[in-house]
Image (cartoon, helix red, strand yellow):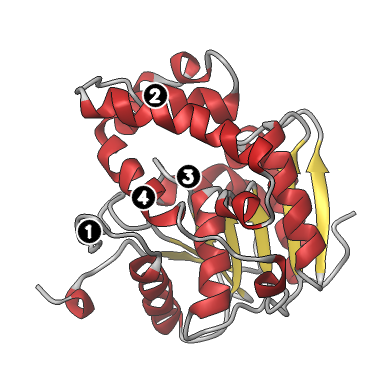
Amino acid sequence: MSEQSVTFDFVETGSGPAVLFLPGSFATTAGWKAVLDHLGEGYRAVTTSLLGYGSTPDTRPDGNATMSQQVDLIDRIIDRIGTTPHVVGHSYGGLSAIVHALTGRHRPASLLLVEANPLGLLRAVGDLEHYRMFESMTGPYFADFARGDAEAARHVIDFYGGLGAFDSMPPKVRSYVIASTPVNVRDWSSGTPFEPTLEILQAIRVPTTVVRGGNTHPAMRRISELLHDAIPESQIVTVEGGSHFLPSTHPSEIATLVRRQVGGLPPS
């Protein structure tokens, strides 16, 4: 089957300005349900699943070390939308939104980056202290996955959400995380080599809001600061009391930020 013939998850509700929601790893269209419940009417909301999640097949070849297939998927989704959308991305979805804004065929009307995780940015600017925080997690994670530990993703979830976050997940969610761990490993292999300099990120010339949780991991806090420093038309917002999984834990706050972003208003 050719890549062009591959279908993808596409759920559309409402009418008004188009807003494309890109979920993070281990998530599908359902990852934005709580945010959409708070968003209200007046928006053409489109949710999808990235490569390998939900009903979107994974077109990345083994050993893939780029984000090109993910960028192509986003372009094809925007082709189907038929107009330039505002793009909201969480975690790996935020990373994908950044790469797409730099290299895709389409440009977003605006970007709302919720805990976006281009960890290669740390390496690009020479911040090895924070970069090694990721390595201290991914090393054991990949090793446990390679030896067949079904709960290897515990390393990722607890890194982002705090110790015990994996065990506190609802059983259905935890089961999906376990089932989709091979896809997440491929997410890491494709996303980690993306090492944009601050100068490269300056090419993103659309209104951008960088969102981080007040209790987020120190490495993620640093990434959000670097993104804000580099992207010319960006603002940074801290959601107090939140960590990495803001669309689930603070959906009302994220919905408010979406409304303000689409309306061209300051985040607060």
Q: Earlier in the sequence, mark 4 or mark 2?
A: 2
Q: Which residue is mark 3?
A: 31
SS category of the residue bearing label 4: helix
Q: Nearer the viewer, residue 170 or 71?
A: 71
The amino acid on which the numbered mark 1 sits, given as a three-letter code, is Pro
User: What percent of the width, then of the height, locates residue 90?
Assistant: 57, 50
Q: CA distance from mark 4 to mark 3?
A: 22 Å
How would you rate the neighbour count of disc 4 (Cα within 10 Å): few for under 14, some for 14-19, many for 20 or more? some
* Name of the residue lying farthest toward the left: 1
Q: Nearer the viewer, residue 85 or 220?
A: 220
Q: Earlier in the sequence, mark 1 or mark 4?
A: 1
4 vs 3, front mark:
4
User: What percent of the width, then of the height, locates residue 244?
Assistant: 62, 36
How would you rate the neighbour count of disc 2 (Cα within 10 Å): few for under 14, some for 14-19, many for 20 or more? some
Q: Earlier in the sequence, mark 2 or mark 3?
A: 3
Please give left or right for residue 1 compared with residue 30 in the image.
left
Identify whether 152 is placed above or below 196.
Answer: above
Identify whether 176 is placed above or below 124.
Answer: above
Q: Which residue is mark 4?
A: 189
| Quadrant position of residue 125 | bottom right
The amino acid on which the numbered mark 4 sits, given as a three-letter code, is Ser
Q: Which residue is mark 2?
A: 140
Q: Earlier in the sequence, mark 4 or mark 3?
A: 3
Q: Residue at x 50, y 55 (%)?
A: 93
Location of the C terminus (image quadrant)? bottom right
The amino acid on which the numbered mark 2 sits, given as a three-letter code, is Pro
Q: Which residue is mark 1?
A: 57
Q: Residue at x 52, y 22 (%)?
A: 158
Please give left or right for residue 240 compared with residue 216 in the image.
right
Q: Mark yes or no: residue 145 visible.
A: yes
